[in-house]
Image (tube, rainbow, N blue to C red):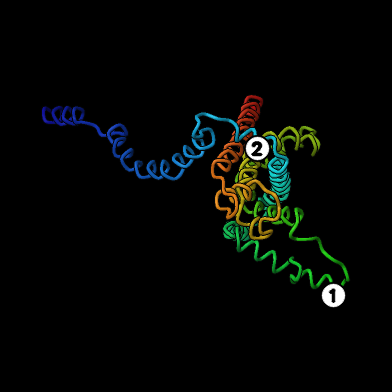
Amino acid sequence: MTSLILSRTTTWDAPRTGPSTRRPLALLWLLPLLLLLGLFCLAPLGWVLWHAIWSPDGFTLSRFASILDSPFYRQAFGKSLWLSGCSSLAGLLIAGVGAAALTRVPGRWRDAVIAFTNMSSNMAGVPLAFAFIVILGTNGAITLMARQWWGIELFDLYSMNGLLLLYIYFQLPLALLLLYPAFDNLQPQWQEAAALLGASPWQILRHITLPVLAPALLGTFILLFANAMGAYASAYALTLGNINLLTIRIASLVSGDLFPDPELAAALCVLLLLILALICWGNQLLKGRFHYANR
């Protein structure tokens, strides 16, 4: 009996190792990631902010004023916003229908579609632009077939319509991968219960499906919009910089052969960051309202 009490006392008094003792080791393993984050994210961001608002004469906002007063740069913002908004909405709608249909596909075929989507999401930039030129360019395969067989001329791939089609294409895999888990979480019992209570399909969509999917739809739209606003390689490889887009203007100011102006490019980057920050802030406000309304 005494030995049993002593053994229990020893067990109870032994030092315990929990999450608090492992926390310094976890922080130590986190240091390389923080170092990379600082070198490749925070340091370039600080450089951009500093060179956008500082000149040899001191603090200045003249670069922002010159951008806002220039019709050329306002056009670049307008075209980039239009292209990003339209491609994000189109990608969201098409991927939403695809994700809803994918939830009703058998498991083996569903896994194959997701694997193919994951693979196709990595095809972007110059290879994607080259594929579009080969298929839909002036002498592309489908363009020649339509011209010889049906006597019709397709749209100009090297225009805003062609860029919009290109952007929608590379938005679709990302949108489908982001929306599929949200659609998969929709329980069929919710729709069945609502239908038994007399709800119409429109009422089920309005009061059940959309409120549940709203956070995922908004978050996916923000990611698609940011993805399109920051796209450069595909647009440049397709149009060779002939269309006035914001990313193309920034690149031409950084590496242009005639009139490089890195400070003005930094100011354009700051305005781009402000636009994306405002959109993300609005997204968080809407998410909070949806969360409060669904409680």
Q: Quadrant of residue 105?
A: bottom right
- Which residue sits furthest right? 151
User: With 255 as the anchor, is 165 left or right in this view?
Assistant: right
User: With 42 as the anchor, is 239 left or right in this view?
Assistant: right
Relative to 58, residue 261 above or below? below
Real-space Cα distance between discs 1 and 2? 47 Å
Q: Secondary structure at mark 1?
A: helix
Relative to 176, residue 6 above or below? above
Q: Which mark is residue 67?
A: 2
Q: Secondary structure at mark 2?
A: helix
Residue 86 visible from this viewpoint: yes
Residue pointed to by mark 1? 148
Residue 85 visible from this viewpoint: no
* Front position in the image: 158 or 253: 253
x and y percent of residue 197 in the render?
77, 32
Residue type marked 2: Ile
x and y percent of residue 169 in the render?
68, 56
* Front position in the image: 141 or 106: 141
Q: Quadrant of residue 292?
A: top right
Task: State which tag comes first along the sequence, 1 or 2.
Answer: 2
Relative to 156, residue 284 above or below? above
